[in-house]
Amino acid sequence: MARIPEHILDQIRQANDVVEVIGTYLPLKRKGTGYWTLCPFHKEKTPSFQVNPQKQIWHCFGCGAGGNVFRFLMQYEGLEFIDAVRRLAERVGIPLALEDAPHALTRSEKDMLLALHEAAANFFHHNLLQEKFAEPARAYLNQRQISLATAKKWRLGYSPDSWDALLEWAKSKEFTPNQLETAGLAVRGHRGLYDRFRGRLMFPICDEQGRPVAFSGRILTDAQDQPKYVNSPETPIFQKGKILFALDKAKRSILDEKFAIVCEGQIDAISCHEAGITNVVAPQGTALTEQHARILKRYTDEIVLMFDADAAGKKAAHRSADALLAAGLVIRVAVLPGDHDPDSFVKEAGADALRKLIADAPGFFAYLLDGLLREHNPRSDRGKLHIAQQVVAFTAKVSNAVLRSACIRETAERLDLPETALLAELKKHKSHLHAAPVPETVPTEAMPAPPAEELLLQMMLMDDRAIALAEQRLDRQWLSPSRAAALIGDILADRHWAGPESFLNRLKDEEASRLVSALLMRPPGRGEPVTIAADCLATLERTWLEGESRRLRKSLTQKGLTAPEILEIQGRILDLRRRMDHIASLLTPRTKQ
Ligand SMILES: [Zn+2]
């Protein structure tokens, strides 16, 4: 990954005042030393989201989200760290030189491709709205009940029915034929380059920031000798496994609604949005990839699959579920009645009916089990066997133990089998699988930190002298495997400590960012930070000593110890005792409240 030098990060952060930046997204009200507003990351009626201008951080006292200005952009806009940095750098006009990024695109090539797609989208769009030759496309829109306003909002277009219309247009715009080929808009044949999209309704495929990076072109006739859809090939700016159609328009409402709806086609997604159901996206192709699942996971934990009722749709739902389960997402399935797809259903039955269908959508397992019970006879042994096999195969993929046992219980009831039989099958099934690598999205849940660790970390963030003290006195073996302890270690390992604000730049982990911002917002407590830190260190040491002496006393009870060994252990226990007494005399007496 491209790396940005630390001092540039700090420069960008300092130039982007956190109050100013967040103020462009949310209405901030000054109260006391901070600015307050309703938290955009959880639903609430009274503001618990605070922006602190002195510390240049934000924190929600309701849901615990927090961090610096980069983290806000990442979370609010759903950006990667590097893209948040890029945006804020652009905002204040700081040029970004990316260190050692040999595989990254040169800025100029990426810029060229983006500019070319932007211009081509305008060209296609202009054709659709203005040109006489686009009449068949307008007739098609009419037939599909897609209004002109909708076509404008989604920048739909029309590619002329010709072999070189786009190539000719490009000349006037000073794009070369080779650039069109790189962008996937032109294809090389025996007699040179020709337009990829000919006589098609054009859907621009946009990235998360709403910039066109590819196109999907739909045929307007019933011609059987041509594919219904022609799509851009993968290019340096377009990887289809990573792009979700309409995500740029849906991301805000996915955060608000707390779930995302995934349907199959672009027209389905557009129709839902136009009907006011705006948390809808569509993958390019029929099934979701694990990368798609990871992108969605940045916005929500719950996905509603809304695929066609036909066999292909069912298959796509099953394949998509695998990717979503692997990312730890909760899945529901909205089943459309009859031959409907989301587009035809919303047009016939209306938005409210579709909303109800979505609200009532059963969990994926209930959907799976219902389907199996319809396909196989649960009263025959053969049917039972089929159903049990598929349930077991599915259940093995569920990582959550509670969900897993709920699946088993429900199946046992519906098949009238003892749970133990299914559990035995599950165990057999799992032993056949190779140990799967842990997916990178599964958070490694850190232990809750002892209060003294969090307090010590807070003091270290507040006062450099507390860091110096910890450097002198802290023994790493006193620390638990908590996140706070890991952060204490990070600070001590930091040779160029430049304060908590720039420390936050380096925290790529959302949980770590939440913890640090929460500690920075916490009232400092009574007394000098150094004194409090000294108390924390003493508490940590004492806790460790107590544990050690418990361990040693226990080892005294084992059989076969020789007399010298017993003496040796007793001596060490005595040492520990002395150290504990010494610490007790050091601890400052707490002022009584
Ligand atoms: Zn919140």
Image: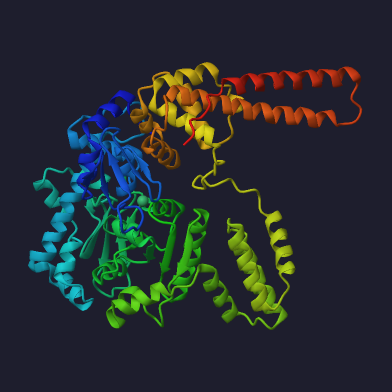
Indicate the quadrant where residue 3 lies. Answer: top left
The chosen color scheme is rainbow
Q: Is residue 477 found left or right of 177 in the rendered image?
A: right
How far across and how far down the image is residue 58, in percent?
A: 32, 41
Picture coordinates of residue 510 (x, y %)?
42, 42
Horizontal side of 452 relative to 298 (left or right) equals right
Which quadrant of the structure image shows residue 371? bottom right
Position of the N terminus, as image quadrant, is: top left
The answer to whether residue 126 shows anywhere in this view is yes
Q: Nearer the viewer, residue 293 or 495?
A: 495
Q: Is 415 drawn above or below residue 563 in the view shown? A: below
For this orientation, the residue located farthest to the front is 592
Q: 420 or 492, which lies in front?
A: 492
Q: Residue at x 17, y 32 (%)?
A: 93
- Which residue occupies the foreground of this view, 341 or 22? 22
User: What residue is shown at x 34% (from left), y 28% (from top)?
Assistant: 502
Residue 471 in the figure: left or right of residue 384: left
Q: Is residue 246 visible?
A: no
- 215 shown above or below 570: below
**Where residue 544 sits: x, y (%)?**
64, 28
Give the quadrant of residue 309: bottom left
Where residue 244 appears, as percent x and y from the top left, is: 34, 56
In this rendering, the count of numbered labels is 0
